[in-house]
Amino acid sequence: MLSLFKAEPHPQPLIDTQYTPDWPSLFSELASNAKDPRLVKFYQAGAVAKDTPLAEVPFVSVDFETTGLNSAEDRILSVGLVPFTLARIQCNGSAHWVVNPNRPLNEESVVIHGITDSDVEHAPRLNAIIGPLLEALAGKIVVVHYKNIERQFLDTAMQYLIGEGIQFPVVDTLDIEYALQRRQTSGWWSRLRGKKPESVRLGKCRERYGLPAYQPHHALTDALATAELLIAQLAHHYPDDATIGDLWQ
């Protein structure tokens, strides 16, 4: 079962945020330079200040299923999102879209996510859901499990569709867990015992916190799983006075 007792804070932060921009200031600049009205509205919603306590941060967990892992060549197939705070997961605000990538699907990706050509045949193109997607993300801190997928795929897709990329702050549960595994297996005693970092796959991470197993590779289910994982990570490893500036990238 998940213990809610806080661990003693470690002197070294888990996440290196020294290169994280001042997101509120950057959003103000980006809003002035953006052309597409959907993107302008997204940036105008702003971002919380870095010293905002985590308990006061509005989060939204996001997951993409894609045709592959290369954002320059592959396409987004489905999007799932779940808004939440550390006090409450807002399932009634969740959303899930299957997207037509306008290309045949390869067998390898179908095996992983189960989305077939017949599923996407009458689905909307990505441009049709960009507006609702950006509205759901506006003003919130995006939470993902492996930021290179959601960040790179959405940025690449936006550049292709509207000629403008997108930037946004993220909290990455994979990065947190990777840092924890490295910390817990560092030092001569761990090396002597042959202790090695454990898997940072979403399901394996959840197991370590006593969270239930969900069927993987469904965008909405994975978004929910990621939201629950972050809440567990923060309960275990971060003090009550931690701020979003300790986590975002």
Image (spheres, rainbow, N blue to C red):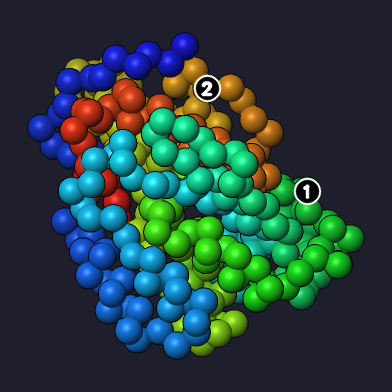
| Label 1 crowd bin: few (<14), some (14–19), many (20+), radius 10 Å | some
Q: Quadrant of residue 67?
A: bottom right
> Residue at (15%, 29%) from the top-left corner?
10
Residue at 33% over, 31% down: 234
**What residue did someone put label 2 on?**
211
Q: Position of residue 171 (x, y in %)?
A: 36, 48
The amino acid sitting under disc 2 is Leu
Is 236 placed above or below 116 here?
above
The residue that label 1 is drawn on is 114
Q: Is residue 2 shown left or right of residue 73? A: left
The furthest residue to the left: 11
The answer to which image quadrant residue 85 occupies is top left
Q: Nearer the viewer, residue 8 or 109?
A: 8
Sequence-wise, the earlier of marks 2 and 1 is: 1
User: In the rendered image of this protein, does residue 152 appear above or below residue 216?
Assistant: below
- Picture layout, residue 142 above or below residue 135: above
